[in-house]
């Protein structure tokens, strides 16, 4: 997508009905429509619209303070947007308006899971317990709101066995089997990041939102993360929306990239399109127009390396 | 254990330096003595006496000053030596534990103390009877056992709210009061038996738990503590002022006593003793009450232990750790908090109706803030979330003051006017300070995982 078309689209979006939003994936799982979030006089996100394709990895990038996390918090029910609509359509056709659901129902009913920029595990609980907490909904039903559980009925025992098996499979996938019974807070940073993703996946999401999953990871851990994210997309068919600053992750695994700057969407396209978008380069690196050519070369280099 | 091992590896060098440098210690103690000298000169060195005539006379007391300085010097030296030795030993121990895979060792005291306490609790009436000669003479010990078990039960109940769900509740005694008054009113007004009132009292208290839970759902930490504190006071003040309903500060008396599942503990025909062919002894009722509270407490314990392994219990603990993460995982934090409040309150209600049936008399006096504070102290001292810790703390907190009463022999040492009981709060405060210094996270701060991948067979 070129710079010019990006601007015209932004300008015309206001007048178009949501369904006719041009471009983007054909079968979106999530449609963010004219999303605006104001905190008092500050407009953190201004009229942002984009789509997340089913089974895609979509990256949301932008300089610091661009409003990425605000968009995330709106999608996952932590903020109620000032304006706009966030529609999630599941495979079966059930559609949820995420901005209208109470916080926990975004995960429970609409099946959108998320991780946090600053890791939010349950530090004193073990790795296994962290994953079991994520399977609250099916286990709660199996335990008949604790009644069957207190009596230790076989139905609940079976459900718990299945939950533990599922958790064990995830623990193995993230390579923590030998530390499964240790408090999550004792794990190294990279393991905690992966555990948080596994915990989110244990809620069986259709859309997984990751807030800077590669922050603070070394190159090897970043590569592991790429593998894990591809596994999530390919094996579990979960669509992924991620905020990321690490371009080696973004450019390598994203099917689509949305770029925000000062709360406004400035570009939306495939990694190749974004890499060549002069406006993105200028906004992201904060350079003057004259220097864009130099920077372009540099970004091209980064992309090739990664 | 990773933490412990790193501490163990770093600390010995520090400890070695501390113990070896004797001259440094002497210097330090001398400095202390010097400060004492500086302080003592204006305060102690001269005493002013009324002299002949109008003036004051100065009496020098340099001997006393010297004595004080010497005492401070010696005490400081001793303190350094003892502390150095203690920390050196601790370091050696940590190092040894880090080497020999400590978790098994840490679990051992729990494995011994738990069954031991339970064994003593189950046989206490027998022990008391044999220890004191006859059942009637052992009454003091059984009464003490009942008192301790009541607090153990309250502690376990509050442990659900504070220890597991992490909601600081300073008004827990309100639910205890609701339970006690439920039984008192239902039995005196409607003539219902204890066994019908017991579940009802639990239900009423749970309803009040939900009632308190709703307005405070958004609050956390200090704010929650203040609101629950106020709630406890409201219940107490209502009981004092609504005279028509609760009898005001005079309370409710002549509450029916407990019966053995319908058979009263009376001397005559049809009483407990004659039905079972025993000679009548008023102690039967006390022993029955003892086992009643023991069973109630054990049920509380069992339910709590079970709940910890259920999704709801795990959600409580997760809520304590991180509420926002809970919400992102689809856990309804409102419901989770309310269930914790309700279940905790229900056990307080059971304990309350037991209190009423045992005393035969309830008044708002029994449900003041101090009670809440003691129950909370039991939970915090025991170690948040640890069932065994709470039991041990309850024994220490309730039993230790009783121990003071039996220290009459100290009168021989300190003179006739000495009453150890008067030092109860002082010792209590000292114990609190000591706990905060040495075990800030409670007697048993180890958290046992509710499920293990290693031992899945269970």
Image (spheres, coloured by chain):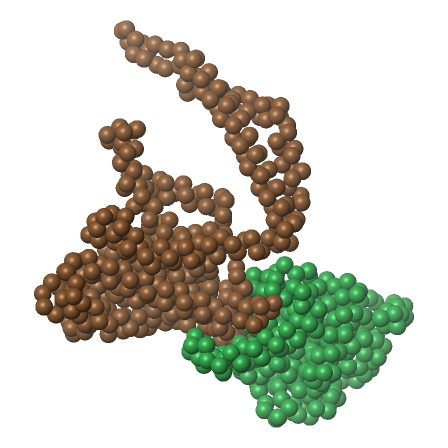
Chain colours: A green, B brown
Residue B380 x %, y %:
43, 54
* Residue occupying image coordinates x 61% and y 49%: B97
Q: Which residue occupies the foreground of this view, B296 or B372? A: B296
**Quarter containing the N terminus of chain B:** bottom right
Tell me the quarter of the picture where residue A170 sits: bottom right
State whether residue B394 is above or below residue B313. Answer: above
Q: Quadrant of residue A242?
A: bottom right
Can residue A7 be seen? no
Q: Residue at x 23, y 66 (%)?
A: B181
Q: Residue furthest left?
A: B268
Task: Give the residue furthest to the top.
Answer: B52
Point out residue B439 in the picture as x, y percentages from the top left corner. 49, 47
| Viewer-closest of B419 and B59 | B419
Instruction: Please determine whether, in this image, residue B68 is positioned above or below residue A166.
Output: above
Q: Position of residue B379 (x, y in %)?
A: 41, 56
Residue beneath the point at 33% across and 59% down: B122
User: Could you say which is closer to the camera, residue B448 or residue A9?
Assistant: B448
Name above or below for residue B258 compared with residue B47. below
Residue B416: image x %, image y %? 23, 30
The extreme front residue here reads B277
Tally of marks: 0
The front one of B119 and B361 is B119
Rendered residue at 48%/57% (across/down): B111
Determine whether, in the image, residue B265 is placed left or right of residue B425. left
Can residue A23 be seen in the rendering of this structure? yes
Q: Is B415 situated left or right of A58 in this image?
A: left
């Amino acid at each position: 997508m070129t710079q010019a078309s990006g601007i015209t689209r932004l300008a015309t979006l206001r007048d178009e009905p949501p369904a006719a939003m041009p471009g983007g994936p054909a079968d979106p799982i999530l449609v963010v429509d004219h999303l605006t979030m104001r905190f008092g006089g500050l407009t953190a996100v201004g009229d942002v619209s984009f789509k997340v394709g089913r089974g895609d990895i979509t990256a949301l990038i932008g300089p610091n303070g661009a409003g990425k996390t605000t968009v995330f918090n709106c999608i996952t029910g932590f903020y109620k947007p000032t304006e706009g609509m966030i529609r999630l359509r599941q495979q079966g056709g059930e559609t949820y308006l995420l901005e209208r659901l109470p916080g926990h129902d975004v995960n429970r009913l609409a099946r959108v899971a998320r991780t946090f920029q600053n890791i939010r595990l349950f530090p004193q609980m073990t790795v296994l317990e962290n994953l079991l907490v994520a399977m609250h909904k099916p286990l709660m039903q199996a335990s008949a709101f604790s009644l069957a559980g207190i009596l230790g009925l076989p139905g609940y025992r079976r459900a718990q066995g299945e939950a533990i098996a599922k958790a064990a499979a995830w623990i193995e996938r993230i390579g923590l089997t030998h530390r499964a019974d240790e408090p999550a807070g004792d794990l190294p940073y990279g393991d905690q990041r992966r555990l948080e993703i596994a915990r989110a996946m244990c809620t069986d999401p259709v859309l997984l939102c990751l807030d800077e999953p590669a922050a603070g990871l070394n190159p090897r851990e970043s590569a592991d993360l790429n593998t894990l994210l591809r596994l999530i997309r390919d094996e579990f068919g979960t669509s992924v929306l991620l905020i990321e600053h690490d371009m080696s992750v973004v450019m390598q695994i994203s099917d689509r990239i949305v770029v925000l700057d000062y709360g406004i969407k400035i570009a939306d396209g495939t990694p190749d399109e974004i890499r060549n978008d002069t406006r993105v380069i200028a906004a992201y690196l904060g350079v003057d127009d004259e220097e864009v050519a130099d920077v372009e070369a540099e970004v091209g280099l980064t992309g090739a390396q990664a | 254990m990773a933490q412990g091992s790193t501490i163990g590896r770093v600390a010995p060098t520090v400890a070695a330096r501390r113990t070896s440098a004797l001259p440094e210690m002497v210097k330090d103690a001398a400095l202390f003595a010097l400060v004492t000298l500086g302080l003592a000169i204006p305060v102690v060195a001269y005493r002013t006496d009324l002299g002949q005539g109008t003036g004051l006379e100065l009496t020098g007391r340099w001997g006393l000053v010297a004595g004080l300085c010497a005492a401070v010097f010696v005490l400081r030296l001793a303190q350094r030596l003892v502390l150095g030795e203690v920390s050196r030993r601790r370091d050696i121990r940590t190092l040894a534990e880090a080497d020999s895979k400590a978790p098994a060792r840490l679990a051992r005291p729990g494995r011994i103390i738990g069954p031991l306490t339970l064994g003593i609790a189950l046989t206490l009436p027998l022990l008391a009877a044999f220890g004191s000669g006859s059942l009637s003479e052992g009454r003091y010990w059984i009464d003490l056992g009942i008192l301790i078990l009541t607090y153990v039960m309250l502690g376990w109940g509050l442990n659900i709210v504070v220890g597991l769900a992490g909601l600081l509740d300073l008004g827990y005694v309100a639910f205890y009061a609701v339970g006690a008054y439920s039984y008192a009113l239902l039995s005196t007004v409607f003539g219902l038996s204890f066994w019908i009132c017991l579940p009802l009292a639990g239900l009423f208290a749970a309803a009040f738990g939900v009632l308190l839970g709703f307005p405070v759902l958004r609050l956390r930490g200090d704010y929650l503590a203040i609101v629950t504190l106020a709630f406890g006071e409201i219940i107490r003040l209502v009981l004092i002022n609504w005279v028509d309903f609760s009898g005001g500060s005079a309370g409710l008396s002549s509450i029916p006593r407990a019966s053995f599942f319908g058979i009263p503990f009376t001397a005559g025909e049809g009483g407990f003793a004659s039905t079972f062919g025993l000679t009548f002894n008023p102690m039967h009722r006390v022993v029955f009450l003892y086992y009643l509270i023991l069973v109630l407490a054990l049920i509380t314990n069992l339910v709590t232990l079970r709940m910890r392994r259920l999704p709801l219990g795990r959600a409580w603990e997760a809520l304590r750790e991180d509420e926002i993460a809970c919400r992102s995982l689809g856990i309804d934090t409102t419901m989770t908090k309310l269930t914790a409040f309700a279940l905790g309150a229900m056990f307080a209600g059971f304990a309350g109706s037991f209190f009423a049936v045992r005393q035969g008399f309830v008044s708002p006096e029994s449900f003041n803030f101090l009670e809440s504070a003691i129950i909370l102290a039991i939970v915090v001292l025991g170690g948040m979330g640890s069932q065994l810790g709470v039991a041990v703390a309850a024994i220490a907190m309730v039993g230790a003051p009783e121990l003071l009463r039996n220290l009459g022999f100290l009168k021989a040492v300190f003179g006739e006017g000495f009453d150890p009981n008067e030092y109860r709060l002082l010792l209590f405060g000292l114990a609190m300070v000591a706990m905060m210094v040495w075990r800030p996270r409670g007697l048993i701060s180890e958290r046992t995982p509710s499920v293990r991948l290693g031992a899945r067979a269970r």
